[in-house]
């Protein structure tokens, strides 16, 4: 396993947002992208709070977690397929 697996989810999302902020400041990404990514992360945190899930290490952000989260977005929150796909796309970029 990778030593990054043992970093906290909070640390990794913070690093991710810092990286995107730098990309916005250099014109690589739009500020709208930063706003959207921040929103996706806060929605993941909201899911954890509502479902009493403690997401400590980033390795716990796995396929099983993501499937349940996306089901929550689509079935519980009754979001559109487009919103579901946006969240899925964000997660793909975040994990990569």
Image: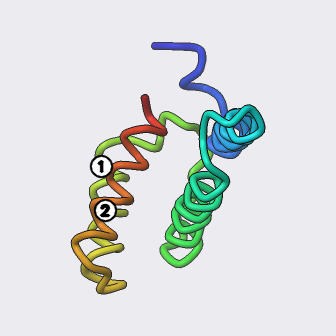
Mark sitting on residue 95: none
From the image, tell me which residue sits under label 1: 64
Count of labels shown? 2
Q: Secondary structure at mark 1?
A: helix
Write the residue at 25% across / 80% down: 75
> Is 47 situated left or right of 72 in this image?
right
Q: Tell me: residue 5, above or below residue 87.
A: above
Counting other residues with Cα less than 10 Å from the Cα at mark 1, is it few (<14), some (14-19), or many (20 or more)? few
- The picture places residue 20, in percent across and down from the top left corner, at 66, 39
Write the residue at 43% across / 38% down: 93
Q: How has the structure been colored for display?
A: rainbow
Mark pair 1, 2: CA separation? 6 Å
Write the residue at 30% across / 49% down: 64
> Is 81 situated left or right of 83 in this image?
left
Q: Tell me: residue 74, above or below residue 56.
A: below
> Is 93 situated left or right of 27 in this image?
left
Q: Nearer the viewer, residue 65 or 91?
A: 91
Q: Secondary structure at mark 2?
A: helix
Q: Nearer the viewer, residue 3 or 87?
A: 87
Q: Are marks 1 and 2 in contact (CB under 8 Å)?
A: yes
The N terminus lies in which quarter of the figure?
Answer: top left
Q: Tell me: residue 11, above or below residue 96.
A: below
Write the residue at 70% across / 41% down: 24
Dividing the picture into quadrants, the one containing residue 37 is bottom right
Dividing the picture into quadrants, the one containing residue 6 is top right
Dividing the picture into quadrants, the one containing residue 96 is top left
> Is 61 situated left or right of 6 in this image?
left
Counting other residues with Cα less than 10 Å from the Cα at mark 2, is it few (<14), some (14-19), or many (20 or more)? few
From the image, tell me which residue sits under label 2: 68
- The picture places residue 48, in percent across and down from the top left corner, at 53, 66
- The picture places residue 23, in percent across and down from the top left corner, at 68, 34
- The picture places residue 34, in percent across and down from the top left corner, at 64, 52
């Amino acid at each position: 396993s990778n030593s990054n697996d043992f970093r906290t989810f909070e640390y990794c999302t913070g690093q991710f947002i810092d990286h995107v902020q730098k990309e916005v400041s250099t014109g690589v990404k739009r500020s709208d992208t930063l706003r959207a990514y921040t929103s996706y992360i806060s929605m993941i945190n909201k899911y954890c709070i509502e479902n009493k899930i403690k997401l400590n290490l980033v390795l716990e952000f796995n396929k099983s977690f993501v499937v349940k989260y996306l089901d929550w977005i689509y079935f519980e929150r009754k979001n559109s397929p487009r919103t579901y796909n946006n969240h899925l796309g964000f997660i793909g970029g975040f994990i990569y």
